[in-house]
Image (cartoon, rainbow, N blue to C red):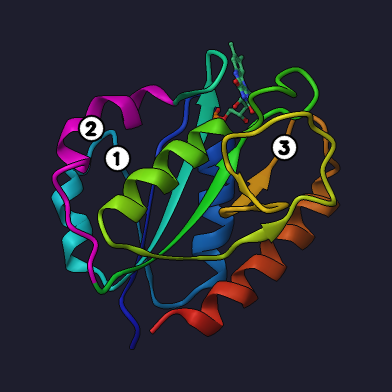
Amino acid sequence: MRNIALFYSSNTGNTQKVANKIAKSLDDIKQYNIKVTACEYMLDYENLIFGISTWEDGQMQKEWQNIWDEFKKIDFTNKKVAIFALGDQKKYKNNFVDAMGTLYKQLTKANATILGFTSCLDYNFEKSEATINNSFVGLPLDLENDDEEITNIRIKNWIEQISKEFK
Ligand SMILES: Cc1cc2nc3c(=O)[nH]c(=O)nc-3n(C[C@H](O)[C@H](O)[C@H](O)COP(=O)(O)O)c2cc1C
């Protein structure tokens, strides 16, 4: 059995809703809210999924900010990591899912192998800290503006994509 864990946090429940959907689609997964689970538990898993939302013009959701000093001490060598991110491409079009970029940069510094990049083409935004060469560094989701059907398709495709690459 593979060893996968999903760590997330959420202000209004949007990231939680997506976390629940992803966890339901994978048999071999453990789900943790970082509000109540210390980040050293991440060390127990070879494959990790992180869920993060962006607030206050480009900032990480508050629980990610709270664990950030501890998180920065973790070495992710030999770990495969995929990120999904909640944001609003209409109201915050110049900071769309910026928090995913912040998380990505730290994970890269900490030697993680990041997978699950997706194309920017399907989205309508101006600027994001979470892109490299027209790809997002994970899966952005916009529950404020996109139909549930589109969101569900994106999640399904992304799970297929990362599932193949997890060890
Ligand atoms: C005050 C406020 C600031 C926000 N700032 C951003 C932002 O800078 N970039 C972005 O993409 N989304 C932003 N959002 C949208 C949220 O990220 C989005 O609603 C998300 O689904 C919230 O997820 P959560 O409830 O799981 O935390 C903001 C929303 C609010 C209410």
Above or below, 31 against 36 in this view is below
Distance from mark 3 CB to nearest ligand 1 atom below 8 Å:
yes
Quadrant holding the N terminus? bottom left
On the image, numbered disc 2 is attached to which residue? Answer: 67
Q: Are marks 1 and 2 in contact (CB under 8 Å)?
A: yes
Left or right position of 76 against 135: left
- Front residue of 6 and 25: 6
The residue segment tinted magenta is 61-77
Quadrant holding the C terminus? bottom left
Name the residue at 60% across, 70% down: 159
Above or below, 23 against 46 in this view is above
Count neighbours of disc 2 (C-alpha within 10 A) and say few if under 14, some if 14 to 19, many if 20 or more.
some
Indicate the quadrant of ligand 1 in the picture: top right
Please tell me whether mark 2 sits on a helix, a strand or a loop.
helix
Residue 13, visible in the rendered structure: no
The tag earlier along the polypeptide, 1 or 3, is 1
On the image, numbered disc 1 is attached to which residue? Answer: 34
The tag earlier along the polypeptide, 3 or 2, is 2
- Front residue of 86 and 126: 126
Please tell me whether mark 1 sits on a helix, a strand or a loop.
loop
The type of residue carrying mark 1 is Ile
The furthest residue to the front: 133
Name the residue at 83% across, 39% down: 146
Q: CA distance from mark 3 to mark 2?
A: 24 Å
On the image, numbered disc 3 is attached to which residue? Answer: 142
